[in-house]
């Protein structure tokens, strides 16, 4: 029977996997780039102060990010807030079930010290004892 199929010219050609693999690799490459190149962007760009001692804090999956600008403006995540609004929003967050989220404070080099102290006091008063200051490590010369 096999001889009869070949005689008629109905021989089955082998499957060419090259185009299939090309499409598969392009899809993998696209999804890797789309999911892993997530850049952290904030509303306000700040020049972080440098610190001689720097310990890398583990990045929390979810956290509050408070950014203080050079003139003392405050942003909670991506929203501009006043000190009173910051206190209310952080206090409301502690009423949710579970542990309160950590707070990461980002300041500009030119930020007045009193603005930083005010935000740290608000974090403590609103029930967020886990807060930290984001700094840039100082480059050490060899």
Image: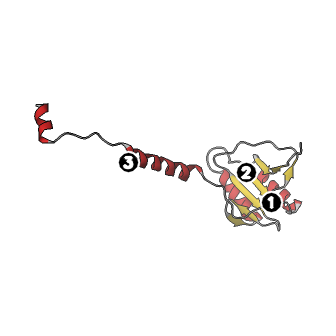
In the picture, residue 54 is in which quadrant?
Answer: top right
| Residue pointed to by mark 2 | 103
Q: Residue furthest front?
A: 7
Q: Secondary structure at mark 3?
A: helix
Alpha carbons under labels 1 and 3: distance apart: 49 Å
Q: How is the image coloured?
A: secondary structure
Return the disc, 1 or 3, that comes first in the chain's sequence.
3
Task: For marks 3 and 2, give the one nearer the viewer.
Answer: 3
Residue beneath the point at 42% across and 47% down: 22
Return the disc, 3 or 2, that comes first in the chain's sequence.
3
Whether residue 41 is situated above or below residue 140 in the rendered picture = below
Q: Secondary structure at mark 1?
A: loop
| Residue pointed to by mark 1 | 47
Residue 73 rendering spot, x and y as whole percentages? 78, 67
Residue beneath the point at 67% across and 64% down: 79
The reply to whether callout 2 and callout 1 are in contact (CB within 8 Å) is: no
Q: Nearer the viewer, residue 80 or 142?
A: 142
Q: Where does the N terminus fall, quadrant-wise?
A: top left
Q: Where does the C terminus fall, quadrant-wise?
A: top right
Residue beneath the point at 70% across and 66% down: 80
Alpha carbons under labels 3 and 2: distance apart: 50 Å
Q: Secondary structure at mark 2?
A: strand
Alpha carbons under labels 2 and 1: distance apart: 19 Å
| Residue pointed to by mark 3 | 19
Category of crowding for the residue at label 1, using alpha-carbon neighbours closer than 10 angstroms: few (below 14), some (14–19), many (at least 20) = some
Return the disc, 2 or 1, that comes first in the chain's sequence.
1
Residue beneath the point at 50% across and 52% down: 30
Q: Is residue 39 left or right of residue 139?
A: left
Residue 59 rendering spot, x and y as whole percentages? 69, 45
Q: Nearer the viewer, residue 86 or 73?
A: 73
């Amino acid at each position: 029977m096999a001889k009869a199929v070949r005689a008629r010219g109905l021989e089955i050609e082998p499957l060419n996997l090259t185009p299939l693999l090309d499409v598969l690799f392009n899809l993998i490459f696209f999804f890797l780039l789309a999911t892993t190149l997530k850049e952290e962007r904030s509303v306000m760009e700040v020049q972080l102060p440098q610190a001689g001692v720097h310990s890398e804090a583990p990045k929390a999956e979810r956290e509050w990010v408070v950014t203080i600008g050079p003139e003392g403006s405050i942003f909670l995540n991506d929203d501009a807030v006043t000190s009173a609004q910051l206190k209310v929003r952080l206090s409301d967050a502690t009423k949710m079930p579970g542990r309160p989220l950590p707070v990461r404070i980002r300041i500009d080099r030119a930020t007045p010290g009193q603005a930083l102290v005010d935000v740290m006091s608000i974090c403590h008063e609103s029930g967020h004892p886990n807060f930290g200051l984001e700094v840039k490590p100082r480059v050490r010369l060899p």
